[in-house]
Image (spheres, grey):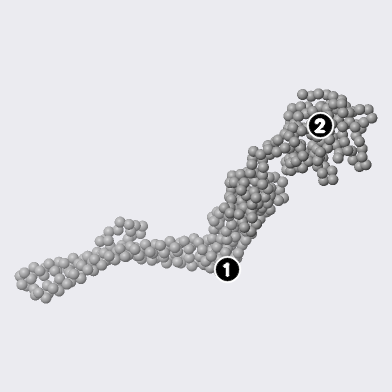
Amino acid sequence: MVRSLGLAVRYCWGSWFAALLCLGTGLAVLAGCGGGEMPAAVSAQAGDPPLPTDVELYTVVKRPWPEGVTVQGMLVGDERVVVGAKVAGRVKEVRVDLGASVRAGDVLAQLEGEDFDLRVQQAQAQVEEIRAKLGLRTGESEKGLDPSKVPNVLQEAAVRNEAKVNLERARELEKKEAISAEELLQRQAAFEVADSRYRTALNEVGGQLALLAVRRAELELARQAQADAIIRAPFNGVVEQRHTARGAYLQVGHPVVSLVRIDPLRFQAGVPERAAIRVRPKQRVRIQVEGRRAWVESEVARISPSVDPANRALLIQADIPNRELSLRAGMFAQAEIVVDPTAQVLAVPAEAITEFAGVEKVWVVRNGRAEARAVETGRRNGAWVEIRANLSEGERVVAKAQSLGLGP
């Protein structure tokens, strides 16, 4: 409800500032937080200084203002690795340099490949040698191989069969007393030797198959070494440092390039011990990177299980998307972790606060008069200012003291 009344104002001037504004005969009141009442008309008494025609009041109420913990930290790479050589060799070329963006699988460097090619050829020849001994044709698998069909086994089987036939003939002749006992024993021994060699040949097939498996493994190792001579990026990232150059001889594990993934980045900060107990995973985090105005919204992704005894802080991390790669690892950033999203505080419009000599005041309306009152302020979010002390809920203040020119 709006009531239009006359307003008499008396200014009592001190030596250097106006001390008091008196609202005399009437006052129109608007109740707060955008609450629906229109400014009241104001009129001045004859002889008083010119006054604003409207005075807008704000009723102090609690406003939703999530409670947060402010921390400072830095951006770190999501992953960082020093890519090293898996095999020894001389560097043929390095294809990347500082700051180069790479995708997973891109070639970073390549070793001279002649030695690796020869090792592959050697291992392949050894595999073919064993296959030939087993009688396997090109493209034929050794799986399901019949040992009795292996050439060496067939040869020993033929000798064994011949010895067996000779032994049986000797036994028939021995019945007719056409052969001596000594000759019969010789043929018996010949058969036993042939049978033993046949069984040995069968056993050797198993050994050859096992050796073939070994040669195949050696071939795969040679091929793997040949592939490892081409050093590739393990993930999408940016080259942080180049450690070698063309012509250098690398031992196994020698660093080639340092690679860091910066999409996403991680905001890493230490939460003071007194606030650490209130921090939980998935809590909203508002991050502002040094040099950028815009705040980045994220959430607590990882929390250390223990407080660092060196600085009594709890390490937390939050992920920051960085698709354009405009942010860099190592940048300083500050953030607010929202620990209570439902919190409410007393707040007034920013224009309701005037400041002089470091003291912040609001103009409180009581019994038709406006008086200046020093207050303790807290957080600000542009249009609103948190009031921490010396102002109560339900009190009314001049909403636009700054624009009305109300002084100390």
Q: Residues within 10 Å of mark 2 (few under 14, many from 20)?
A: few
Q: Picture quarter containing residue 21?
A: top right
Give the x, y percent position of residue 216: 39, 62
Count the labels in the image: 2
Give the x, y percent position of residue 166: 14, 69
Q: Secondary structure beneath disc 2?
A: strand
Give the x, y percent position of residue 50: 90, 31
Q: What residue do we see at 73% from left, 34% from top?
A: 393
* Type of amino acid under label 2: Arg
Q: What residue do we see at 27% from left, 61% from top?
A: 147
Give the x, y percent position of residue 33: 73, 32
Give the vertical position of 24 relative to 388 (above or below): above
Identify the mark at residue 366; answer none if there is no mark: 2
Provide the residue designation for mark 1.
248
Report the front residue among 369 and 45.
369
Give the vertical position of 362 relative to 224 (above or below): above
* Type of amino acid under label 1: Ala
Is label 1 or label 2 in front? 2
Q: Quadrant of the C terminus?
A: top right
| Residue 266 visible within the image | no
Q: Is residue 235 left or right of residue 292?
A: left
